[in-house]
Amino acid sequence: MSNPESGGVRSVQLVIDVLETVAFSADELGVTQIAQRLNVTKGSVHRHLQTLVERGYLAQNSSTARYTIGPKSRLLAKHAPDTDVANLAEGPMRQLRDALDQPVVLSEMTPRGVLVLAKLPSTSPIEIGVRPGSELAFHASAQGKLMLAFAPRPFRDRILSRPLQRFTEKTLVSPRKIEHELREIVRLGYASAPEEVALGLNAVAAPIFDARNVCVAAIAIVGLIQFLPEKPRQSDVTLLAEAARQISRKLGHGRNADRPSTSGRTTRSAR
């Protein structure tokens, strides 16, 4: 006997997948393109597209019959809080990109992985394939490992108890080795992932904290391994850490410095 609830959940997941596919695309998309990207039938995609257009979350171009983001989705974005980390991070991200001429990526944690919120490309003719809306694995990305390192222990244990995908021969899939690396990340204050997601690529990430001293996001530089070596240059790390501190201060981090925290420990602002 089939479970109607599971079917309902799958339907919700598909409609969200359709919405995200269109929203995060740089161009308008047709039914066939959306179906191919999601590996589902055109019929099921079309039904969800009709609903999303009727509700105003997507819009259909009458000339091309392709789909783009709708007015209700734009209205939701306008109602985002003023402390939206992507808006606050724009200035420090741009300064970091200009100083290093490397792509800069801002990410936030979700239950499934690390979501890329924003990216500033470098001037290089070679484009690094990280785009807003992408989800990065916790165990194989600099941003993901950074988030895990500062996450509550129960969440970290839950993530590391799952089967971990090996993307390259350099991807760590041993929970014991990952735990050791997470302790080093907390000690150093940054994380890297040389060729762990794709050969030839590296990323270095630093944590962004809010007023409660919670790691809520990560800023990272991403590049080819010859320009962003396996052992990060101290000058790069220093600039990255400063950008993270600037964004953290905008989120209120450090305002309660040297006041007793709820756990009885004294909090200190990032220097």
Image: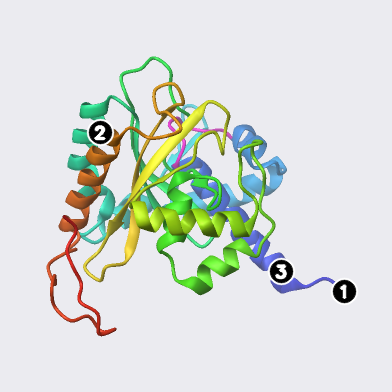
The crowd level at tag 2 (other Cα within 10 Å; few <14, some 14-19, many 20+) is: few
Which residue is the site of mark 2? 235
Query: What's the mark number on residue 6?
Result: 3
Gap between marks 2 and 3, in whole Å?
51 Å
Q: Nearer the viewer, residue 35 or 106?
A: 106
Name the one closer to the observer, 249 or 57: 249
Mark whose residue sits in front, 2 or 3: 2
> Which portion, as a residue range, is magenta?
24-30
Instruction: Tell me the kind of residue under disc 1.
Output: Met
Reply above or below: 124 against 192. Answer: above
Protein image colouring? rainbow
Q: Secondary structure at mark 3?
A: helix
Mark 2, secondary structure of its residue: helix
Query: Residues under labels 3 and 1: Cα distance?
Result: 12 Å
N-terminal of the two: label 3 or label 1? 1
Mark 2 or 3 closer to N-term?
A: 3
Density class for disc 3 (Cα within 10 Å; few <14, some 14-19, many ≥20) is: few
In depth, the one of 209 and 68 nearer the eye is 209
Q: Residues within 10 Å of mark 1 (few under 14, many from 20)?
A: few
Asked if residue 40 lies left or right of residue 185, the reply is right
Query: What x and y, as percent, mark residue 44?
Result: 68, 49
Q: State yes or no: residue 29 in magenta.
A: yes
Residue 196 is inside the magenta segment: no
From the image, tell me which residue sits under label 1.
Answer: 1
In the figure, 240 relative to 84: above or below? above
Side of 138 where 4 appears, left or right = right
* Mark nearer the N terminus (2 vs 1): 1
Residue sitting at the far top:
125
Q: Quadrant of residue 103?
A: top left
Residue 81 image point, x, y percent: 24, 61
Q: Give the number of the mark in front: 2 or 1.
A: 2
